[in-house]
Image (cartoon, rainbow, N blue to C red):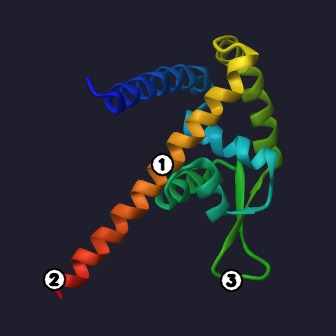
Amino acid sequence: MARGHLLAMHLRGAYLALHRQAQDVFAPFGITADQFVLLTLLAEKDAVIQQDLVRRSASDPNTIRAMLMLLEKVGLVQRRRHRHDGRARTVHLTPKGRRLHGKLIEAARTLHEVISAALPDSDWRTVVGYLDRVAASMAQLRQASRRLKQKRLSCKR
């Protein structure tokens, strides 16, 4: 089996195992693992534009917009027009959202401890660095694929 394929399968396996466990932890609160990510990003830095959440969550704009609309509907976040850019929206964690986030962090404590214990401190930074490199490589590949697709479309015209 090719090295890239093997790495992709291991990354997928680790991600899915983590995601499934997180889903189980957050389900009693009516929150998904992906929604938890958004709440955590807002708890770290509130009043950000949606595009910043897209970037920081490594997700796509449509997914983030849909999740924010749902979180807004249940009163966990509030979206407002940006003060200086009428096209942009800032996202704020509501007091209800902040309280729930605190409960979610507590509920995830064991999950976070297990993840941390899986890697010795000496390996932690190395693994995170490698994961960042893989993500950056995939972003470069995606950009190159988009440019090639645009080039092909322009040649057909």
Residue type marked 1: Ser
Counting residues from the start of the chain, the first of labels 2 and 1 encountered is 1
**Mark 3 = which residue?**
86
Q: Position of residue 31 (x, y in %)?
A: 59, 34
What percent of the width, then of the height, locates residue 46?
80, 55
Q: CA distance from mark 3 to mark 1?
A: 34 Å
Front in this rendered view, residue 131 or 67: 131
User: In terms of depth relative to the viewer, which is nearer, 21 or 95?
Assistant: 21
Residue 31 visible in rendering: no
Q: Residue furthest bottom?
A: 157
Q: Earlier in the sequence, mark 3 or mark 2?
A: 3
- Which image quarter is the N terminus in? top left
| Cα distance between the residues tagged 3 and 2 | 37 Å
- Please name the residue that numbered disc 2 is placed on: 156
Q: Determine contact: label 3, label 2, CB under 8 Å.
A: no
Q: At label 2, which amino acid type do we have?
A: Lys
